[in-house]
Amino acid sequence: MENRKDQIIEAALKRFSHFGFHKTTMNEIADDLRITKANLYYYYPDKSTLILDVLIKLGNDVYAGEKEIVESYSGDLMKTMNEILDYRAGFTRKYYVLHICENLDWIKGLDINEVMQDFYQREVALIKSLYKKSITNGELIMEDVEGSACTLVEIQKGLGIIHTISDVITGIPNEDNVDKILESQKRALKLIFEARIASNK
């Protein structure tokens, strides 16, 4: 059986992913769990702390799935990278409301910057490990592995922002944008890597 904090995070995630952070109340989360608000506040003194743990859970889940894909690399860099993008798009689609809300001003008072920086560093490290596998396999030609991994992560994140900026501003989700993000990110991969792949198998 999950511990109480895990149960709270799961209940909050269901609410947040449907209604967003702002429209979800602690009372609603407590009601969903059939516990008192006082009991909920015992574990989470405010909604911001709970949001942070929800984001950490999602970040960990995404990372675990992407790491599994990288570890299954079998000599085809583009296939592996496209699998990562497809996996991430599935996650973004499922939690799209959170995707467009994650940078709102009212949650910036959290230790969110540190958490997001950790996510970024983990993502860069994962891409670096994939590059190194591909280089060792003789598939990829690349000198600046660190810089290239940073750049790719930044490009992919930037493409996500370009296609969701109107949703972020209006707060009105349009999940069709996930397909636009995915298409743009795959085009970027092709543009960046076609000339670097040493052998097309």
Image (cartoon, helix red, strand yellow):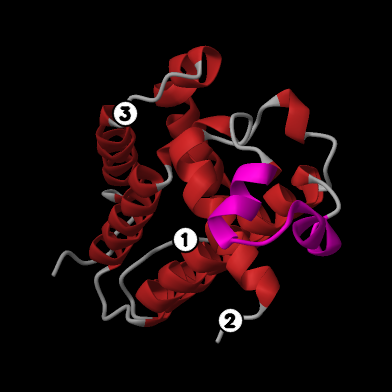
Please indicate whether residue 168 sits to the left or right of residue 47 in the image.
left
Task: Please name the amino acid that badge 1 sits on.
Answer: Met
Decide which of tag 1 and tag 2 comes sooner along the chain.
Answer: 2
- Would you name the residue on which mark 1 appears? 142
Q: Residue at x 36, y 73 (%)?
A: 69
Q: Residue furthest bottom?
A: 1
Please indicate whether residue 8 sits to the left or right of residue 134 in the image.
right
Task: Please name the amino acid that badge 2 sits on.
Answer: Glu
Q: Are discs 1 and 3 less than 8 Å apart at CB?
A: no
Please indicate whether residue 128 sits to the left or right of residue 105 in the image.
left
Is residue 12 at all visible to an observer of this figure? yes
Closest to the observer, 194 or 46: 46
Callout 3: SS: helix
- Would you name the residue on which mark 2 appears? 2
Q: CA distance from mark 3 to mark 2?
A: 34 Å
> Which picture quadrant has residue 10?
bottom right
| Residue 149 image position (x, y, % from top left) | 54, 55
- Quadrant of image for the N terminus: bottom right
> Which picture quadrant has residue 137?
bottom left
Task: Please name the amino acid that badge 3 sits on.
Answer: Asn
Q: Are discs 1 and 2 less than 8 Å apart at CB?
A: no
Callout 2: SS: loop
- Would you name the residue on which mark 3 appears? 177
Residue 43 located within the stretch drawn in magenta: yes
Residue segment shown in magenta: 27-44
Decide which of tag 1 and tag 3 comes sooner along the chain.
Answer: 1
Compared to residue 30, the image places residue 156 above or below, namely: above
Residue 141 located within the stretch drawn in magenta: no
